[in-house]
Image (cartoon, grey):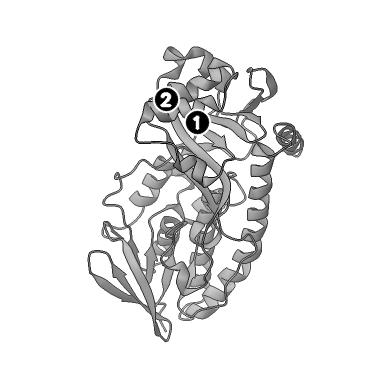
Amino acid sequence: MMTPSVTIVGAGLGGLVLARALHLNGIPAIVYEAEASAGARTQGGMLDIHERDGQMALKAAGLFDQFRALIHLGGEASRVLDPQCRVLLDQPDDGTGGRPEVLRGELRRILLDGLPAGTIRWGRKLANAKGLGDGRHALTFTDGSTVTTDLLVGADGAWSKVRPLLLDATPAYVGATFIDTYLFDADARYPATAQAVGGGGMFALTPGRGIFAHREPGGTLHAYIGLRRPAEWIAAIDFGNAAAAKARIAAEFAGWAPALTTLITHSDTPPVPRLLHTLPSDHRWNRVPGVTLLGDAAHLAPPAGEGANLAMLDGAELAQAIVANPGDVEAALATYEAALFPRSHAAAAGAHHILDLCLGDSAPFGLLDFFTGAFSRGE
């Protein structure tokens, strides 16, 4: 019996790794993506790709050499500052950290380029999915079009429309928000801020608030302004008025060094709030014939450097299970999920711990202890 073609909802990194790894093994897949095109939306900032998961996935996708060509040298450096820019920790990038930095958009590009023409069906936003029995599912898109499939993979992120086929869990706000800002050509225009951020990642933290920043290629500084505040507090800020929003956010950092607050007040882009939502850390679902999940659709957790890596590993391991069980979709999905659940549970617990170290009562000293321990272990 031949393995049926695979229908993937969502052209994020995890779904693309799955499609690419299946393609290398002669198994066709179609990816339905809500965005109108590959360039319809900015694809976020830097990702650290770990040896134990993301890099393994890229090897399975046959794209490891292309990935190596994208690495932002020096990006693994980490530093922790106090609100007055005093350096509490400065760990340079010595090239041995095992988590090189690349731009998310560039990583997505090599995955897209590695797929046959027509694999991605752009502009197809899923409205709902329903079971037809015998493992088959019907998908209805917002444009009114429909498809049926023998094997459905929800790779459609935090607010997955495939997830309800498997479980009732919905993402819940964790009480913290990250607000995106950017400074362009920072070395020339804002040298003090560029020096404060350094060559890689910078953390300036106190309980309940923090400024996280990372150097991107071309002199760009990308910052995430972290605030532990109720969702209603964030909603009360008029983000449609960029100047007013910057002023309101900066007021939470009164007394901090201008080299740090410049990341807020002088942002070259309007500030964008990203309320952090998570699924229950220990959730799982019972096997439902013909459907599974990967990435944030399966195990949404706070950002801690693991999300993209886990999504890609999910895609690679699901492809491996499908290839290893030709004609037996249920055996493939059961094998995949048996490894997925404990891995994602552990990662989610770790991500919640990192968020607490960054914005909880121990900030920044808990994070300093974590970093020094990780560095001593060579992580």
Q: Going from the N terminus, do you reach mark 2 or mark 1 first?
A: 1
Q: Nearer the viewer, residue 310 or 61?
A: 310
Judging by the rendered image, the residue that carries numbered circle 2 is 267
Query: Which amino acid type is marked by label 1?
Result: Ala
Residue at screen point 26% across, 72% down: 146
Distance of label 2 from label 1 (alpha carbons): 9 Å
Judging by the rendered image, the residue that carries numbered circle 1 is 223
| Disc 1 residue crowd, few under 14, some 14–19, many 20+, Cα 10 Å | many
Count of marks, rendered view: 2
Query: Which amino acid type is marked by label 2?
Result: Ser
| Disc 2 residue crowd, few under 14, some 14–19, many 20+, Cα 10 Å | many
Q: Position of residue 373 (x, y in %)?
A: 76, 37
Q: Position of residue 106 (x, y in %)?
A: 40, 40
Q: Nearer the viewer, residue 364 or 26?
A: 364
Quarter occupied by the N terminus: bottom left
User: Image height check: is 157 above or below 223?
Assistant: below
Instruction: Work out which residue is located at the far bottom of the displayed protein and give it.
Output: 134
Quarter occupied by the C terminus: top right
Q: Position of residue 119 (x, y in %)?
A: 30, 60
Q: Nearer the viewer, residue 376 or 83?
A: 83
CB under 8 Å between discs 2 and 1: yes
Quarter of the image for residue 202 reads: top right
Q: Is residue 198 visible?
A: no
